Image: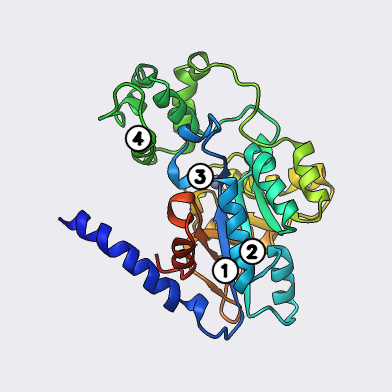
Amino acid sequence: MKTALKRILKPVLESVVGVLGPHERAARPARLWLLMYHRVLPDSDPRFVLEEPGMLLQPDTLERHIQELRREFELVSLREWVEHREQGRQLPPKACALTFDDGWADNYEYAFPVLRALSAPATVFAVAAKIGTDFKFWPNIVGTLLGSGQQAALAAHPLLSDSLTGTGGNADQVQIAQVISRLKVHSDLQLHAALEQIEWRKYLAPRASSDLMDWQQMREMRASGLVEIGSHTCTHSRLTRLTSQAELQHEIVESKHILESRLGSPIDLFCFPDGDYNAQALSLVREHYRASVTTRRGINSAAQVDLHQLRRIAMHDEMTSTRTRLRARLSGWI
Ligand SMILES: [Zn+2]
């Protein structure tokens, strides 16, 4: 009953907040809408079905987003907005910046052509020590194994088998997302170690392409003048799970050095993996970066914002594929 009612009320709610939300009101003071994207893949791509729905957006949707956003926002580069804010210069009343987390190869394949065609600026947050490697994020290893009927392989390790309840045969996107969410109680280090122990590589067909971009692709995106690169740590470890200052230092400071030396320019922006941080991590990020982004939902007011705890709005196909849904999402309320 509750679900049925929700299904009926949701479109009504979406239309109402889409019209009444803060993005519709006179813009005072200047504000920044920061949009958070992850993977950009068409549903015809074999990688699409193996990913959690909350991570996905189709290239056509991205194109529509940019066209729609331009009707009421000024699309800006996050770094430039931060610079202007630091220098006390005038900011657009309603600025909007696109951010892409993790540095997925599909961002180069599918998002970059859209950004270039529409001359839209964006920031990509890269996992510095994994660029150009065959690294797979643990949720993708788990998702690929479950999606190809290989749960027996996962069941061989107690840490992984505990989260497998309810999956049988080839798991679908929803089942995969449930297992991943249950596994998040463990640290990234524990999960990667467990997957190494079951020797996950032997269960998967070798793939021609890597999940993440390589340095050449990253340089090409930067050279377009549209894409800025920021750090998303060295290994994508959730920072609140790290136990020593040395580990934090490595993830936050070393990632900046790797990116700066390979790309040949300053790296000023940082993104917290999974949005997780504590006082220790935040203070180190403040010391080494001009600004950082979180996964806390909201719209940033230039007058009050803490540049190191910028809020974002997550964008994925399910929530933003129609104009009404996109507008509702931009309200920052749903
Ligand atoms: Zn990430």
Mark 2 or mark 3, which is nearer to you?
3
Indicate which label's residue lies in the foreground, 2 or 4: 2
User: Looking at the rendered structure, which numbered label has been put on residue 76?
Assistant: none
Horizontal and vertical percent for residue 269? 68, 58
Element marked by disc 4: helix
- Closest to the camera, between mark 1 and mark 4, is 1
- Pointer 2: residues within 10 angstroms few (<14), some, or many (20+)? many
Marks 2 and 3 sit apart, C-alpha to C-alpha, by: 18 Å
SS at badge 1: strand
Q: At label 2, which amino acid type do we have? A: Ala
Q: Residue at x 54, y 57 (%)?
A: 280
Asked if residue 89 is positioned above or below residue 128 in the image, the reply reads below
Determine the residue positioned at 44% across, 38% down. Answer: 187
| Mark-to-mark CA distance, 2 and 1 | 6 Å
Residue 178, image x and y in percent? 33, 39
Kindly identify which residue carries mark 3. 56
Residue 97: mark = 2
Mark 2 lies on a secondary structure that is strand
In the image, what residue type sits under mark 4?
Val
Q: CA distance from mark 1 to mark 4?
A: 32 Å
Going by the image, does 128 lie left or right of 326? right
Quadrant of the drawing holding the N terminus:
bottom left
Quarter of the image that includes the C terminus: bottom left
Q: Are the residues tagged 1 and 4 within 8 Å (C-beta)?
A: no
Report, in whole angstroms, how far the alpha carbon at label 2 lies from the one at label 4. Answer: 32 Å
CB within 8 Å, label 1 to label 3: no
Q: Residue at x 80, y 43 (%)?
A: 219
| Picture disc at residue 179 | 4
Q: Nearer the viewer, mark 1 or mark 3?
A: 3
Q: Which residue is mark 1?
A: 33
Among the two numbered marks 2 and 3 on one chain, the one whose residue lies closer to the N terminus: 3
Q: Position of residue 208 (x, y in %)?
A: 65, 21
